Amino acid sequence: MRPARSRPRRAGARRGVVPPGPWPLENVLNALPGFRVKSDFGLFAGECALYRPKQVSKPTNFSEQPPSLPPRSPSVRAVSALRALHWREVSAIQEIWLCEGLCRSGMVSCAGDLLAVVVWVCFCGVRVDLRKVVKMVKICCLGAGYVGGPTMAVIALKCPAIEVVVVDISVVRIAAWNSDQLPIYEPGLDEVVKQCRGRNLFFSTDIEKHVSEADIIFVSVNTPTKTRGLGAGKAADLTYWESAARMIADVSKSDKIVVEKSTVPVKTAEAIEKILTHNSKGINFQILSNPEFLAEGTAIQDLFKPDRVLIGGRETSEGQKAVKALKDVYAHWVPEDRIITTNLWSAEISKLAANAFLAQRISSVNAISALCEATGADVTEVAYAVGRDSRIGPKFLNASVGFGGSCFQKDILNLVYICECNGLPEVAHYWKQVIKINDYQKSRFVNRVVASMFNTVSGKKIAVLGFAFKKDTGDTRETPAIDVCKGLLGDKAAISIYDPQVTEDQIQRDLAMNKFDWDHPLHLQPMSPTAVKQVSVTWDAYEATKGAHGVCILTEWDEFKTLDYQRIYDNMQKPAFVFDGRNIVNVDKLREIGFIVYSIGKPLDAWLKDMPAVA
Ligand code: UDX
Ligand code: UDX
């Protein structure tokens, strides 16, 4: 397809009016009767504005008012201009589609060029159905999970001209995405999905069809930690990724950009590239690494306003073209200075390093929390004082029962394994400590509970408030609650759990599952053994705490701050204990009520001081 700018003038075009290409928009528009182009922002940067001086008589076909040009997106501006030109041939949605298609097809490179085409077409009375020559960009995402679902929903919302299809091998998951009960709980996600589903966002199990039709394929399938064989307990198992790559190679009939969205070990792109090119049948595949930095509970916010978008690609011209194509997608709503482009390996390492740094901060403050308890310091005060140093910053310094989530541990293990494989045992050992401190923090918490309650919890009811790995999500992957509950069950406690978003089935599965088994598609997860008998799950915090000896707060849900603790105390066995693993309760108030309170890294209750030492 020839770029529009070099298209020859058609017969029928008024001679001398439309200058021969290349066509600076300015010349084209200024050649039109009654139109002037104000180009003080630079037309080819897309910052163009049209206006029509009042004294000039209105030309037929053109609007009275200057178009209002919304900021940033070239295509949106182009659409406004199209509308203003009363180009009635196309309906609103087609206009957008058309403009995007033109830009993306390479026929035009910016709004300025696009306007030139449109004006030329209108002015010369040429009736070209541009829909026949331009193709809408199609995106397909493999894996409709916590990452794929929200990310694609936001792309669809922000890029109405792009068709986005999310595919998954799990029929149940896709059915849920197509229902009113989405498979994941994420604030703001419902509204985004409602706005785009059926318009330019689709969920399907017809994987091969949508992969073969797509221009850009995101891959966001599971990459579990290996449980056996080489690198067991550390290395990522790329089975799902590899079969995705083979399938893509198999069904593709046109060139594709394949985007790594899953967190993967460094150099995965190279392996995937090899699989694709060795099976390609002459098709050109470009691999990009575009790691996800969204955090659950704030995923939509993070996607709307990311600190940065990172795109890694090959340094060849094809690689850079692919990087630009993906950059153009994000540029619909992300300011350009927030889109970082790097080589493939830097992008892959950055993802692992970012998560390792974040987890390291938590392990650092958690290590200090143990020292605070031993010395009478208050970890919140210490963290505040430390975080006020602008070089350190205040975020991610909340001491807790330990970090959880699908990424931190897995990514650090990955990093550790990669370091070991590259002959860097000291570096591997350094990062391993972040996980060790996290494990220590969880067992320290369990020991506190048991030690405080006369060194045994056997047969005692312990209420667990919160099971998700953090608030505002129903996700329980690697939640510290699993290890804490297992620890208490090991001491024969009877546990009663309440979490506002986690189902009984999920909790039972988590407590029965082997380490690392969670990171497989739902229907491929090993069948759980029978439910753990000493565990009951309720949908009510007061029910869970009724008759309990102790309460453990394991997730920082806001509602736990405003519970009626007097009512809880009145219905508990005495002495009544609260073990706050997230430092959210008002310790003084609870002590006034009569509770014995343990808060991570805070000066100890007199009661706890007299109890056996904690490992
Ligand atoms: C996923 C991976 O788990 C994580 O390792 C990676 O870093 C990012 O992508 P997430 O979206 O949170 O993260 O995982 P999950 O919710 O488990 O979603 C993965 C989806 O992929 C599942 O719905 C699963 O059914 C699907 N899948 C998996 C496929 O469609 N095909 C496969 O071959 C494997
Ligand atoms: C993380 C990264 O933040 C995100 O950029 C990446 O894409 C995926 O991994 P996520 O796991 O969703 O996101 O949640 P995050 O907010 O990072 O919390 C992780 C864990 O750390 C949670 O268990 C949380 O409770 C804990 N945490 C966090 C603390 O214990 N203290 C803190 O100060 C912050």
Image (cartoon, rainbow, N blue to C red):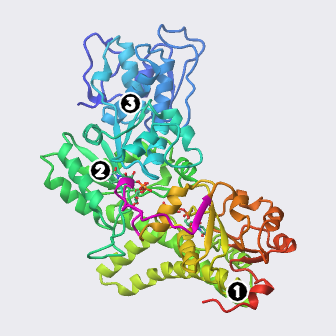
C-alpha separation, residue under disc 3 versus residue under disc 2: 29 Å
Amino acid identity at mark 3? Asp
Single out the mark in the foreground, 1 or 3.
Answer: 1
Looking at the image, which residue sits at the far right? Answer: 592
Magenta-colored segment: predominant secondary structure: loop
Residue 33 or residue 64, whichever sits in front: 64
Left or right of 204 on screen, residue 244: left
Left or right of 456 on screen, residue 13: left
The residue shown at (14%, 52%) is 279
| Mark 2, secondary structure of its residue | strand
The disc placed on residue 454 is 1
Residue 522 among those drawn in magenta: yes
The disc placed on residue 197 is none
Q: Quadrant of residue 56?
A: top right
The residue shown at (36%, 75%) is 234
Amino acid identity at mark 1? Phe
Looking at the image, which residue sits at the far left? Answer: 281
Residue 331 among those drawn in magenta: no
| Label 1 or label 3, whichever comes before in sequence order | 3
Residue at which label 2 appears:
258
Residue 483 or residue 80, whichever sits in front: 483
| Label 3 or label 2, whichever comes before in sequence order | 3
Left or right of 301 on screen, residue 477: left
Q: Position of residue 175 (x, y in %)?
A: 42, 40
Count neighbours of disc 3 (C-alpha within 10 A) and say few if under 14, some if 14 to 19, many if 20 or more: many
Q: Note whether 519 is above or below 303 in the view shown.
A: below
Q: Position of residue 46 (x, y in %)?
A: 46, 36
